[in-house]
């Protein structure tokens, strides 16, 4: 299985790019935008069909969008002058992963827990509770180990929450949901290379349609 990583550097002069980035609706706008780069007419959700994971992030040179997919995207389907686009295969990185290897990682994720029915009734909790602070770090450490990584160092930075509709049409389209986000950075040791490859392809946690779950790695120097 080949995975593709695409880096989009939006043009400051592109009205479409400026509209897509920033604000509480950023995640769902970018979700629609990156899916434009793939063929129409697939059965089922397009994001799952093409294995799409993405995130927007700030760099010293400005914002960028990272897009991972199982199908190579077509940048010509973006609006004219949207920005620069560079795509590369992740085959070399994936084949290089070995047990015991130390890597640097980054993942913007949606750390949550689902309280039991008794706790929800006793404390008036919602079905899904966003985690922060040490609870978010502990969530990340569990997710990482379940995906073949042993965290050696963790930085956890809360980001602005994003929002979107619960569904594309009907009553769900009128219900707005918030997705809390935390950016996890650090170093980790590979515990299980094959499991890690699977988790890289599937992503981490919930909120993938809102720009959460993309795990990126680089060999530690």
Image (cartoon, helix red, strand yellow):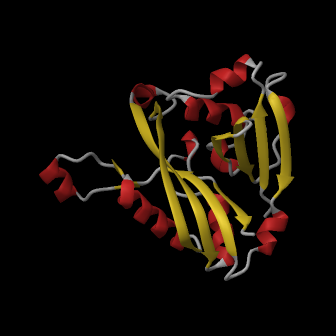
Looking at the image, can residue 38 be seen?
no
| Residue farthest to the left, as pictured | 122
Residue in the foreground of this view, choosing between 33 and 65: 65
Instruction: Pinpoint residue 12: horizontal percent, then vertical percent.
Output: 75, 23
* Residue at (55% x, 58% y) in the render: 204
| Image quadrant assignment for residue 66 | top right
Q: Is residue 199 above or below residue 194?
A: above
User: In the drawing, does residue 103 fall left or right of residue 72?
Assistant: left
Looking at the image, can residue 70 be seen?
yes
Residue in the foreground of this view, choosing between 40 and 136: 136
User: In the drawing, does residue 156 fall left or right of residue 71?
Assistant: left
| Image quadrant assignment for residue 117 | bottom left
Quadrant (top left/top right/bottom left/bottom right) for the C terminus = bottom right
Q: In this view, does 14 lie above or below 68?
A: above
Instruction: Pinpoint residue 39: horizontal percent, then vertical percent.
Output: 78, 38
Instruction: Pinpoint residue 156: horizontal percent, then vertical percent.
Output: 49, 55
Instruction: Pinpoint residue 9: horizontal percent, then vertical percent.
Output: 77, 35
* Residue at (49% x, 49% y) in the render: 157
Q: Is residue 14 above or below residue 140?
A: above
* Residue at (62% x, 43% y) in the render: 45
User: In the drawing, does residue 150 fall left or right of residue 201?
Assistant: left
* Residue at (48% x, 68% y) in the render: 141
């Amino acid at each position: 299985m080949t995975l593709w990583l695409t880096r989009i550097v939006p043009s400051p002069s592109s009205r479409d790019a400026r509209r897509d980035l920033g604000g509480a609706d950023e995640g769902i706008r970018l979700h629609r935008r990156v899916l434009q780069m793939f063929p129409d007419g697939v059965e089922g959700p397009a994001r799952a069909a093409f294995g799409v994971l993405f995130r927007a992030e700030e760099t010293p040179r400005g914002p960028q969008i990272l897009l991972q997919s199982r199908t190579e995207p077509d940048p010509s389907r973006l609006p004219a002058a949207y920005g620069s686009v560079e795509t590369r295969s992740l085959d070399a990185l994936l084949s290089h992963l070995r047990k015991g290897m130390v890597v640097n990682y980054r993942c913007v994720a949606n750390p949550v827990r689902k309280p039991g029915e008794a706790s929800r009734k006793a404390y008036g909790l919602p079905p899904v509770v966003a985690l922060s602070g040490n609870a978010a770090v502990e969530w990340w450490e569990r997710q990482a180990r379940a995906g073949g990584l042993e965290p050696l160092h963790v930085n956890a930075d809360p980001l602005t929450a994003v929002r979107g509709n619960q569904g594309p049409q009907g009553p769900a389209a009128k219900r707005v949901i918030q997705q809390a986000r935390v950016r996890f950075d650090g170093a980790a040791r590979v515990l299980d290379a094959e499991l890690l490859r699977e988790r890289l392809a599937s992503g981490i946690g919930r909120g993938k349609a809102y720009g959460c779950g993309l795990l990126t790695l680089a060999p530690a120097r």
